Image: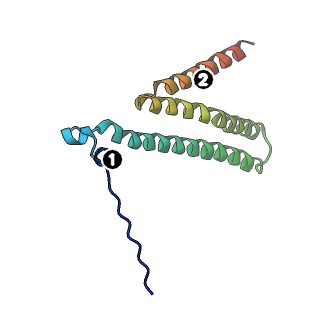
């Protein structure tokens, strides 16, 4: 026993016109004008994210390397020179950890500005300005 079901759909002229408009290419494609700027944004965004990723990795590796070197210096015989070197290396490691996110903010603000996202670039600049004021006020006290 074989069952078949046939569905017949009739479109009104309005529905056919709506369907044609929905599947028609955008007017830019018909005129031959392409939007080259929008295709460049994903590449710029990816490049900015790669720079930020590299920057964060480099900061973490640099800080970790300085700290591990300071730990290795503790195995040397104790002297004033070794103590000074350990202190300098640990301060350098801490500074690298603190400076890395600030530099990341500079890179992010710059890439956002290059992409034309001025509001977020201004936010990044504002945060950097507040950090500068805070550091400046902290140095005077």
Residue 62 position in % (x across, y down) = 61, 43
Of tags 1 and 2, which is closer to the observer? 1
Q: Which residue is mark 1?
A: 15
Foreground residue, 47 or 65? Answer: 47
Q: Quadrant of the N terminus?
A: bottom left
Element type where label 2 sits in the image: helix
- Scheme by which the image is coloured: rainbow
Mark 1 crowd level (few <14, some 14–19, many ≥20, 10 Å Cα):
few
Element type where label 1 sits in the image: helix
Would residue 126 be visible to someone looking at this image? Answer: yes
Residue placed farthest to the left in the image?
Answer: 31
Q: Residue 117 vs residue 75: left or right?
A: left
Q: Is 79 drawn above or below residue 23 in the view shown? A: above
Image mark for residue 127? 2
Foreground residue, 49 or 22? Answer: 22
Foreground residue, 71 or 76? Answer: 71
Q: Is 133 drawn above or below residue 26 in the view shown? A: above
The image quadrant of residue 43 is top left
The residue at 44%/80% (across/down) is 3
Q: Residue 27 vs residue 54: left or right?
A: left
Mark 2 crowd level (few <14, some 14–19, many ≥20, 10 Å Cα):
some
Distance from disc 1 to disc 2, alpha carbons, whole Å, reads 53 Å
Residue placed farthest to the bottom in the image?
Answer: 1
Q: Residue 118 vs residue 129: left or right?
A: left
Would residue 32 be visible to someone looking at this image? Answer: no
The residue at 57%/20% (across/down) is 126
Residue 28 position in % (x across, y down) = 25, 38
Residue 69 position in % (x across, y down) = 68, 47
Q: Quadrant of the C terminus?
A: top right
Q: Residue 30 vs residue 87: left or right?
A: left
């Amino acid at each position: 026993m074989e069952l078949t079901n046939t569905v017949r759909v009739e479109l009104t002229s309005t529905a056919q016109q709506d369907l044609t408009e929905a599947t028609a290419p955008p007017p830019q494609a018909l005129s031959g004008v392409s939007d080259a700027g929008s295709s460049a944004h994903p590449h710029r965004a990816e490049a900015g994210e790669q720079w930020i990723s590299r920057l964060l990795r480099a900061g973490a590796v640099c800080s970790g390397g300085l700290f591990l070197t300071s730990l290795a210096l503790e195995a040397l015989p104790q002297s004033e020179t070794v103590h000074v070197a350990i202190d300098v290396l640990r301060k350098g490691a801490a500074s690298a950890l603190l400076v890395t996110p600030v530099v990341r903010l500079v890179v992010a603000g710059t890439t956002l500005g290059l992409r034309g996202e001025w509001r977020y670039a201004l936010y990044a600049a504002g945060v950097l300005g507040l950090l500068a004021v805070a550091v400046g006020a902290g140095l005077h006290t």
